[in-house]
């Protein structure tokens, strides 16, 4: 995937309305005026996604103190996200994008390398949006382990 195929700093974040884990519609505009960390994860209740989600959970206070709202997005149905949220005591919304429309708008779905093979799938990605809905920091192919610490460092947020 070339740089031209990705969102870049300063781009307007693609708008969306997705269902949260309770089936309630959540429009991106509901976060207007807030800084948002949108992270795309491949599948609820898998080892890497659980590691990443729990890392966000455990660091949510420092992110919130710095003015950031965290939102997870996956292709999982709301019921599976609800089960994941309850199982791991997650303290932020998980949005459902089963048809991958939002994943594709953010370029978080496409060709990726998996165990040395090129496959099509969800690209673990995080986007930090500013209060006006612009991409402040686009991160593609992030690692589940240590991602939040790396993100906090990039955003200059102390623990």
Image (cartoon, helix red, strand yellow):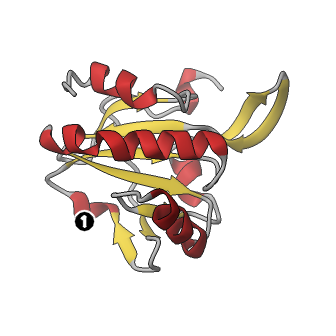
| 146 to the left or right of 76 | left
Please identify the quarter of the rendering in which residue 61 is found.
top left
Q: Residue at image x 20%, y 21%?
A: 156
The relative height of residue 71 versus residue 154 in the rendered view (above or below) is below
Which secondary structure, mark 1? helix
Residue 41 in the image: x percent, y percent? 56, 46
Camera sees residue 109: no
Q: Residue furthest bottom?
A: 23
Q: Residue at image x 14%, y 53%?
A: 33
Residue 106 in the image: x percent, y percent? 50, 45
Please identify the quarter of the rendering in which residue 68 is found.
top left
Count of marks, rendered view: 1
The relative height of residue 17 versus residue 43 in the rendered view (above or below) is below
Q: Nearer the viewer, residue 26 or 62?
A: 62
Residue 71 in the image: x percent, y percent? 38, 53
Residue 105 in the image: x percent, y percent? 52, 49
Where, quadrant-wise, is the N terminus in this rendering?
top right
| 58 to the left or right of 61 | right
Camera sees residue 155: yes
Q: Residue at image x 38%, y 42%?
A: 56
Where, quadrant-wise, is the C terminus in this rendering?
top left
Q: Which residue is mark 1?
A: 30
Residue neighbourhood size for the residue with mark 1, other residues' Cα within 10 Å, grouped as few (<14), some (14–19), many (≥20): few
The relative height of residue 8 versus residue 134 in the rendered view (above or below) is above
| 79 to the left or right of 89 | right
Q: Residue at image x 41%, y 59%?
A: 89
Q: Nearer the viewer, residue 59 or 77?
A: 59
| 3 to the left or right of 26 | right
């Amino acid at each position: 995937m070339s740089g031209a195929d990705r969102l870049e700093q300063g781009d307007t974040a693609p708008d969306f309305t997705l269902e949260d884990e309770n089936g309630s519609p959540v429009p991106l505009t509901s976060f207007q005026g807030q800084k948002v960390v949108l992270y795309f994860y491949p599948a609820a209740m898998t080892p890497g996604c659980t590691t990443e989600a729990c890392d966000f959970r455990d660091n949510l206070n420092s992110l919130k103190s710095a003015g950031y709202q965290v939102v997870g997005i996956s292709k999982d149905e709301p019921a599976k996200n609800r089960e994941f949220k309850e199982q791991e005591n997650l303290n932020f919304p998980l949005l459902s994008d089963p048809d991958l429309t939002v994943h594709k708008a953010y370029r978080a779905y496409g060709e990726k390398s998996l165990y040395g093979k090129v496959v099509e799938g969800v690209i673990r990605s995080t986007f930090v949006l500013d209060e006006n809905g612009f991409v402040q920091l686009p991160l593609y192919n992030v690692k589940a382990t240590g991602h939040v610490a790396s993100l906090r460092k990039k955003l200059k947020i102390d623990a």
